[in-house]
Amino acid sequence: MANNHVKNMESSLLSDNYYILKKFSFDFLMSNGEWVNQMREVYDRGDGAGILLYNKEKKTVVLTKQFRMPTYLNENKDGMLVEICAGMLDKDNPEQCVIRETEEEVGYRLKEVKKVYEAYSSPGVMTEKMHFFIGEYTDDMKVSDGGGVEDEHEDIEVLEIPFEEAVRMLNHGEIVDTRTIVLLQYAQIHKLIE
Ligand SMILES: Nc1nc2c(ncn2[C@@H]2O[C@H](COP(=O)(O)OP(=O)(O)O[C@H]3O[C@H](CO)[C@@H](O)[C@H](O)[C@@H]3O)[C@@H](O)[C@H]2O)c(=O)[nH]1
Ligand SMILES: [Mg+2]
């Protein structure tokens, strides 16, 4: 983190109740040459990875639907959100993470995945970097119903839908998760399904 526009950085812990929330105070050299003191709260939950699962022959994609409390608090009426399959890295590398999450959440055992992007999720607030993947699935890779980890009270609905329907949902504002928008648009741009 060495640079010449941040100095005197100090942090204090606000919460480690589940993940880590810290308050940072630092001096920042503005582009006009003036040093100013700034304060930022930063949430650290580690990094994440997500995958768009697609089937070229059936022209389908597999998405998930689950309750997301933060969206429930901000205009998402029932709090249910359609998303790509995704999870937090925990101790895995990004590739292992999406393979694990795909089996846990939607029940497919993948052999191969392809990384397409790496991006900060919400750079003003969170440290989280998200690793984006795509992966082809076929019916014979199905090993369970998915649904998420019961012990963690995950309750995930598996949606296998025509890619055309996913694009319609995207264009009608029915998909409001940034990561899902990014990968569906990737699929459109790169003509993964024709
Ligand atoms: N008790 C408790 N459990 C929590 C809390 N926050 C999350 N969990 C649990 O931690 C687990 C996380 O599941 P994952 O599948 O690994 O993560 P995710 O929530 O799907 O995260 C993905 O989407 C996020 C976007 O909302 C991304 O931020 C993240 O990187 C990842 O891609 C879930 O069982 C969830 O219920 C909390 O504050 N308290
Ligand atoms: Mg998840």
Image: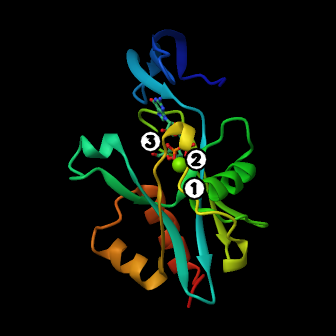
Discs 1, 2 touching: Cβ within 8 Å: yes
Vertical position of residue 29 compared to residue 78: above or below: above
Mark positioned earlier in the residue sequence (2 or 3): 2
Vertical side of 6 occupied by 102: above or below: below
Q: Does the Cβ of the disc 1 residue fall within 8 Å of ligand 2? A: yes
Measuring 53% from the left and 23% from the top, which residue is drawn there?
Answer: 5
| Residue 112 screen position, x and y as percent | 77, 67
One can see residue 149 in this view: yes
In the image: residue 6, left or right of residue 34 = right
Tell me the kind of residue under disc 3: Ser
Q: Residues within 10 Å of mark 3 (few under 14, many from 20)?
A: few
Residue drawn at (58%, 42%) of the image: 129
Q: CA distance from mark 1 to mark 2?
A: 9 Å
In the displayed image of the protein, which residue is found farthest to the right? Answer: 111
Expressed as whole percent of the image width and height from the top left, the position of residue 16 reads: 50, 16
Is the CB atom of the residue marked by disc 3 within 8 angstroms of ligand 1's nearest atom? no
Disc 2 from disc 3: Cα separation: 16 Å
Foreground of the two, 183 or 124: 183
What SS does tag 1 mark?
Answer: helix
Q: At 42% across and 32% down in the image, what residue appears? A: 125
Q: Which mark is residue 105?
A: 1
Left or right: 18 in relation to 48: left
**Beta carbon of the mark 2 residue lies under 8 A of ligand 1:** yes
Please name whichever residue, 69 or 94, is drawn nearer the observer in this view of the structure.
Answer: 69
Residue 169 position by quadrant: bottom left
Q: In what element is the residue under mark 2?
A: strand
The image's mark for residue 87 is 2
Q: Would you name the residue on which mark 3 appears?
A: 122
**Amino acid at the residue labelled 2:** Gly
Which comes sooner in the sequence, label 1 or label 2? 2
Give, as a three-letter code, the residue at label 1. Glu
- Residue lying at 72% horizontally and 72% vertically, measured from the top left: 141
